Amino acid sequence: MAVAFGARLTIACAYSLPGSGSPAVGGGVLGQLAGTAVAPPSGEPPADLRWRVTRAAEAEELARRAAEVAESLGCHDVATVAVPGDPAAALVALASSLSADLLVVGSKGMQSWTRFVLGSVPNAISHHAPCDVLIVRTDR
């Protein structure tokens, strides 16, 4: 769609922070690093924060690979971003900050029984997004 309409494509991958629900809780990664009494060895985060760095790196890598696919299909105005926090809230906030015209999400979580108890990311996005939402069936 971005190629057909000459639009900029921002590929976002949200990742949750277990136990916090939000990167702002507890000061986020930077806040916790700033509060660390002992400086970590050069280039390596403290052991209790490594999972966050790993999650961010995985999200960035996933977004980068998706951008490569988009570029191979002719989309040359592509940006990528990894956003921490509750996936639905993070993607809605990102769409708002970018003044997005369309938010495209996969249907993951819409078919499982847990959607009745926990809801699903696509469902939450469809109710709170500041723009149109396209939910693409991804369970096939």
Image: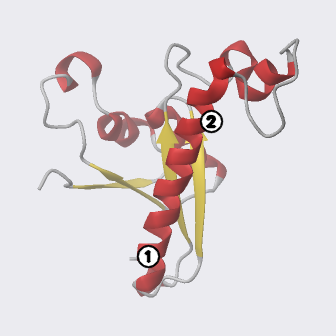
52 vs 113, left or right, is right
> Which residue is at 53% across, 25% downward?
17
Residue 67 vs residue 114: left or right? right
Residue 40 in the image: x percent, y percent?
82, 26
What is the quadrant of residue 120 in the picture? top left
Q: Is residue 28 visible?
A: yes
- Above or below, 132 relative to 122: below
Which residue is tagged 2?
A: 53
Label 2 CA crowd tier, 10 Å (few <14, some 14–19, many 20+): few
Q: Residue at x 37, y 36 (%)?
A: 127
Of the residues shown, which amino acid type is indicated by label 2?
A: Val
Asked whether residue 130 is in view, the answer is no
Q: Residues within 10 Å of mark 1 (few under 14, many from 20)?
A: some
First along the sequence among labels 1 and 2: 2
Q: Which mark is residue 70?
A: 1
Please, what secondary structure does the residue beneath circle 1 have?
Answer: helix
Element type at mark 2: helix
Q: Residue at image x 83%, y 15%?
A: 36
Residue 63: give x, y in percent of width and height.
Answer: 50, 58
* Residue at 51% over, 13% down: 19
Quarter of the N terminus within the rendering: bottom left
> Along the line of sight, which residue is nearer the eye, 110 or 27?
27
Q: Residue furthest front?
A: 41
Residue type (three-letter) at the residue carrying disc 1: Ala
Q: Nearer the viewer, residue 69 or 52?
A: 52
Q: Mark 1 or mark 2, which is nearer to you? A: 2
